[in-house]
């Protein structure tokens, strides 16, 4: 390493330690230009790229390091993190496994492997590396959160809740723990706690639809359908192409006696994903509520019959939507559900959107991956429905 490269490298390290990652990245890249064959500079530059959100550039650089030095375990684990972020779970899993064979207590590899297994739906298998990581890092919010997720997804709810709460004692604004705890509490029908927690989470990440959808489900569970609808509307503003949120809005619209809107949301969801059964179920339920049994049957069997949504039935639905918009006759064509019907049709206390349904879920875990490197960080509501509920209860 030349004197000039050493000076730039030391400056980059100082900036990184002070938390100024953008300037640190510039200095690392400058040092790399001055010493292109220095592996340590290349690795630190790649790590800075990853932490700054440049996963593809980091992956390219880390691949070169691993190719020239296959036993550079830190680079291989970081390469796995890049691949996990970019959705290449097979190669990420292989790299994490390779690292752990040589260094069983590598923290990034343990975290990464647990994350990959959770992404693959193998929560029981993920609990192994998550528990080993927890033994190494018992006071890490990110570690406690990934362990809690393995427990939640293997129905160990009490253990999961305890781990999430412990994570939040360490880092009160750790968004992944806040979201995970909200999901578990929702399954336990602890709606008031979910409302409080998701409102606070939404303040931190206002552009993430998931906390708003969980909030919507909790409000619906409490019977506050108008408020639940408002929360779901806010979620849709965050992700206009979410079929799950559109289906949630369709279901809530139907329960509120808004048949035209219910069909419109369901049809929009179907147009976004013609192979999904959820939008057709929502559409069929609204038609059935309006006593259009033949059309409802056609819609509900559209996928299983292999023919898709019948064009004539679609036109019939579009005409109903148009009529509803023009003269608001939905009250006569689609009677508003009775109190008993609303109660029996209450949503199951499960979030309508999961991490797998949104890119932000993966981004959220990715932030925790970089948090195992240096430093966690997080970002503020306007959950409209709560105001009306607060007024009505005062």
Image (cartoon, helix red, strand yellow):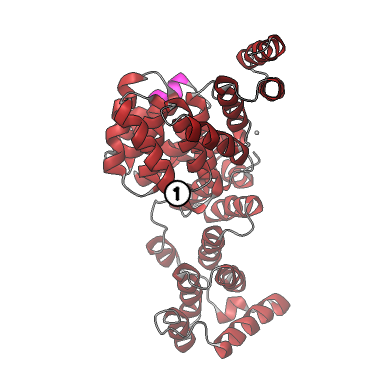
Secondary structure of the residue carrying numbered label 1? loop
The answer to whether residue 73 is left or right of residue 60 is left
Q: Quadrant of residue 133?
A: top left
Looking at the picture, tell me which residue is in the foreground, 160 or 75: 75
| Relative depth, front residue between 324 and 179 | 179
Quarter residue 61 falls in:
top right
Residue 67, above or below 290: above
Circle 1 residues within 10 Å: few <14, some 14–19, many ≥20: some
For the point 52% across and 82% down, which residue is it? 309
Image spot of residue 313 (x, y percent): 55, 87
Determine if residue 217 is in view.
yes
User: The C terminus is located in which quarter?
Assistant: top right
Question: In x, y percent, where is residue 163?
Answer: 35, 28
Tell me the quarter of the image containing the N terminus. Answer: top right
Question: Does 125 sit above or below residue 138?
Answer: below
Q: In the rendered structure, does residue 377 fall within the stretch colored magenta?
A: no
Mark 1 — residue?
Answer: 222
- Residue 136 left/right relative to 216: left
Question: Could you tell me residue 105's position as x and y percent?
Answer: 33, 23
Task: Indicate whether 296 appears above or below 385.
Answer: below
Q: State yes or no: residue 166 in magenta.
A: yes
Q: Position of residue 345 (x, y in %)?
A: 41, 64
Task: Report which quarter residue 126 is drawn in.
Answer: top left
User: Which of 204 and 358 lies nearest the eye of the viewer?
Assistant: 358
Picture layout, residue 212 above or below residue 279: above
Specify the segment rendered in magenta: 165-170
Q: Residue at x 44, y 79 (%)?
A: 303
């Amino acid at each position: 390493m030349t004197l000039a490269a050493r000076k730039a490298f030391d400056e980059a390290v100082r900036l990184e330690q002070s938390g100024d990652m953008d300037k640190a990245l510039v200095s690392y890249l400058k040092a790399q230009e001055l010493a292109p064959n220095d592996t340590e500079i290349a690795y630190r530059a790649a790590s800075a790229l990853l932490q700054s959100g440049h996963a593809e550039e980091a992956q390219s650089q880390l691949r070169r390091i691993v190719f020239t030095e296959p036993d550079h375990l830190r680079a291989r684990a970081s390469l796995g993190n890049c691949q996990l972020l970019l959705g290449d779970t097979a190669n990420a899993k292989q790299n994490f496994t390779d690292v752990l064979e040589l260094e069983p207590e590598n923290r990034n590899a343990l975290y990464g492997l647990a994350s990959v297994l959770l992404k693959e739906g193998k929560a029981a298998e993920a609990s192994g590396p998550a528990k080993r990581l927890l033994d190494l890092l018992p006071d890490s919010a990110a570690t406690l959160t990934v362990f809690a997720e393995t427990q939640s997804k293997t129905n160990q709810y009490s253990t999961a809740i305890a781990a999430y709460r412990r994570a939040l004692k360490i880092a009160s604004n750790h968004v992944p723990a806040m979201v995970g705890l909200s999901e578990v509490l929702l399954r336990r029908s602890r709606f008031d706690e979910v409302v409080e927690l998701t409102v606070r989470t939404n303040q931190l990440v206002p552009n993430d639809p998931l906390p708003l959808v969980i909030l919507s489900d909790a409000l619906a569970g409490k019977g506050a359908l108008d408020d639940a609808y408002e929360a779901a509307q806010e979620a849709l503003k965050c992700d206009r192409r979410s079929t799950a949120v559109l289906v949630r809005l369709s279901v809530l619209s139907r329960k509120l006696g808004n048949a035209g809107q219910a069909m419109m949301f369901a049809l929009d969801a179907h147009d976004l994903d013609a192979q999904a059964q959820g939008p057709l179920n929502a559409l069929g339920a609204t038609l059935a509520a309006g006593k259009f049994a033949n059309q409802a049957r056609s819609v509900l069997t559209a996928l299983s019959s292999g023919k898709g949504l019948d064009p004539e039935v679609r036109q019939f639905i579009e005409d109903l939507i148009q009529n509803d918009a023009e003269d608001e006759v939905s009250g006569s064509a689609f009677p508003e559900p009775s109190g008993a019907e609303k109660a029996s049709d209450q949503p199951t206390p499960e979030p309508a959107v999961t991490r797998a349904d949104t890119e932000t879920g993966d981004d959220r875990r990715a932030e925790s991956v970089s948090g195992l490197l240096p430093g966690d960080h997080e970002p503020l509501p306007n959950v409209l429905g709560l105001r009306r509920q607060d007024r009505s209860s005062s």
